[in-house]
Image (cartoon, grey):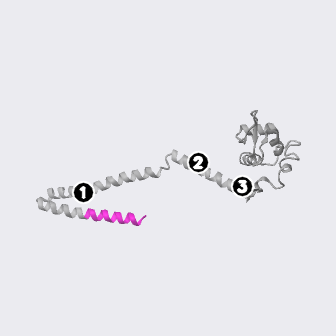
Amino acid sequence: MPDPLTTSQLAERLGLAASTVRKYAQEGMPPAGHTPDGGRLWDEDACRVWLADHILDTGHGGRREGAGRKPGGPAAHGPATPWHTRRRNGAPSMTQQEYNKARALKETAIANMKVLELRKMQGELVEVEQVRATWAEALGNFRRALDDLPKAIATRAAMELSLDKQGWDALKGVVESEVEAVRERLLEEAQRGK
């Protein structure tokens, strides 16, 4: 890492006023350290990355006469190529087009996450675990109802048909086997659907 720069050195390298560097520091541009007397020290490359991420790189400061980048600005002290095309740690950095595309993808992903959070807050989306718990409870209730069905059918049929204990047991056994067959079919269909 190159030697850290003072605020005035960084301002000169970036073609900015020292007050602008201080303003960006208040907005979150991270310093690389501090001088013994409390002044900030800066890593030029880290500051350039922060500026690219947080400040629009329009290339001009407005329509006033003399506004915009000054001769001897960033390009005069750095390489002839823009910062985003320099080689860092032996690996080529991305081009401006690649950077813009990556940034757009990031912003789209963030926007999509915000939409999902909003839909969740509005009750349109629920957590997977909540859905599983609800289904587990519903299927448990369904299974208990199926388990109670043979006894209920056999009891009602025995009363209406005047069946004795043996007839009641026989009817209950038939209904139990039919319920078990239905349960097995449902299980097979569920496994095929996975």
Residue 66 appears in the rendering: yes
Location of the C terminus by quadrant is bottom left
List x then y, in percent, for residue 36. 75, 34
The local crowd at label 3, few if under 14, some if 14 to 19, many if 20 or more residues have their Cα within 10 Å, is few
Q: Which residue is mark 1?
A: 149
Cα distance, mark 3 to mark 1?
Answer: 65 Å
Residues drawn in magenta: 178-194
Residue 51 among those drawn in magenta: no
* Circle nearer the viewer, 2 or 3: 3
Q: Which residue is mark 3?
A: 100
Q: Of the residues shown, which amino acid type is indicated by label 3?
A: Asn
The earlier-in-sequence mark between 2 and 3 is 3
Cα distance, mark 2 to mark 1?
Answer: 48 Å
* Helix, strand or loop for the magenta stretch, by majority: helix
What is the number of the mark on residue 114? 2
Work out whether 32 lies above or below 109: above
The answer to which quarter of the image holds residue 42 is: top right
The earlier-in-sequence mark between 2 and 1 is 2
The earlier-in-sequence mark between 3 and 1 is 3
- As rendered, which of 24 and 67 lies closer to the eye? 24
Element type at mark 1? helix
Cα distance, mark 2 to mark 3?
Answer: 21 Å
Work out whether 85 lies above or below 20: below
Q: Contact, CB < 8 Å: mark 2 with mark 3?
A: no
The local crowd at label 1, few if under 14, some if 14 to 19, many if 20 or more residues have their Cα within 10 Å, is some
List x then y, in percent, for residue 52. 74, 48
- Write the residue at 11% across / 59% down: 165
